[in-house]
Image: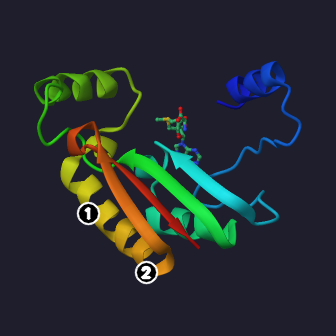
């Protein structure tokens, strides 16, 4: 991911980006809080979700913006992709891309229920928008 990000930064000529390799549940390399933080499809597989959310919020300055998109269920509630998901899940596990527990519907729902409650308690003007027929959720708010 970092190599791809580096290529993209070089291609675009961006000068205000610093890439950091860190554990999302620790974020020990982040020194100063940012104006905005974004997490895409990562926190759902971080094992200590409450710690990761707290770190993300601490890495965002007061009044700054926090945006998270993730899979909160292992398959859509409805829609054309729903019947394909059991097969997709088996392929991801067989290929070693995801562990079975990361694709467990009950576990995902339970951890995100806690995660959303924590975000609601700590963010102002929190909004939530489902996508992918209910499998994904975009969450946004101000610290
Ligand atoms: C589904 S990919 C998403 C990658 C990227 N955010 C994107 O949108 O294309 C999830 C990534 O999270 C990484 N990951 C898993 N646990 C992590 C952790 N504790 N800290 C940082 N990254 C983690 C995995 O290695 C994987 O590359």
Mark 2 surroundings within 10 Å by alpha-carbon count, few (fewer than 14), some (14 through 19), many (20 or more): few
| Badge 1 element | helix
What is the quadrant of residue 84 in the picture? top left
The residue closer to the viewer here, 26 or 128, is: 128
Classify the position of ligand 1 by quadrant: top left, top right, bottom left or bottom right.
top right
**Residue that carries the numbered disc 1 in the rendered image:** 110
Q: Residue at x 27, y 37 (%)?
A: 132
Question: Quick check: 22 left or right of 111?
Answer: right
Number of callouts: 2
The residue closer to the viewer here, 6 or 140, is: 140
Give residue 136's position: percent from left, percent from top.
Answer: 32, 45
The residue closer to the viewer here, 90 or 136, is: 136
Q: Residue at x 80, y 19 (%)?
A: 11
| Badge 2 element | helix
Disc ID at residue 121: 2
What is the quadrant of residue 76 in the picture? top left
Give residue 10's position: percent from left, percent from top.
Answer: 83, 23
Q: Is residue 7 above or below residue 124?
A: above
Q: Residue at x 60, y 69 (%)?
A: 57
Q: Is residue 18 above or below residue 26?
A: above
Q: Residue at x 14, y 43 (%)?
A: 77
Mark 1 surroundings within 10 Å by alpha-carbon count, few (fewer than 14), some (14 through 19), many (20 or more): few
Residue ranking furthest to the front:
125
Q: Is residue 131 above or below residue 52?
A: above
Give residue 36's position: percent from left, percent from top.
Answer: 66, 58
**Label located before the other in sequence (2 or 1):** 1
CA distance for labels 2 and 1 = 17 Å
Specify the quadrant that holds the C terminus: bottom right
Question: Quick check: 56 left or right of 98?
Answer: right
Give the label, 2 or 1, closer to the camera.
2
């Amino acid at each position: 991911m970092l190599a791809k990000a580096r290529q993209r930064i070089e291609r675009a000529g961006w000068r205000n980006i610093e890439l950091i390799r860190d554990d999302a549940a620790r974020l020990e390399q982040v020194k100063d809080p940012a104006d905005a933080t974004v997490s895409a499809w990562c926190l759902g597989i971080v094992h200590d979700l409450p710690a990761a959310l707290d770190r993300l919020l601490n890495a965002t300055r007061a009044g700054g913006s926090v945006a998270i998109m993730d899979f909160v269920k292992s398959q859509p509630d409805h829609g054309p992709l729903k019947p394909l998901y059991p097969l997709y899940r088996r392929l991801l596990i067989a290929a070693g891309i995801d562990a079975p527990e990361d694709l467990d519907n009950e576990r995902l729902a339970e951890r995100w229920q806690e995660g959303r409650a924590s975000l609601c308690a700590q963010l102002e003007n929190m909004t939530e928008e489902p996508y992918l027929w209910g499998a994904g959720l975009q969450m946004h708010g101000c610290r």
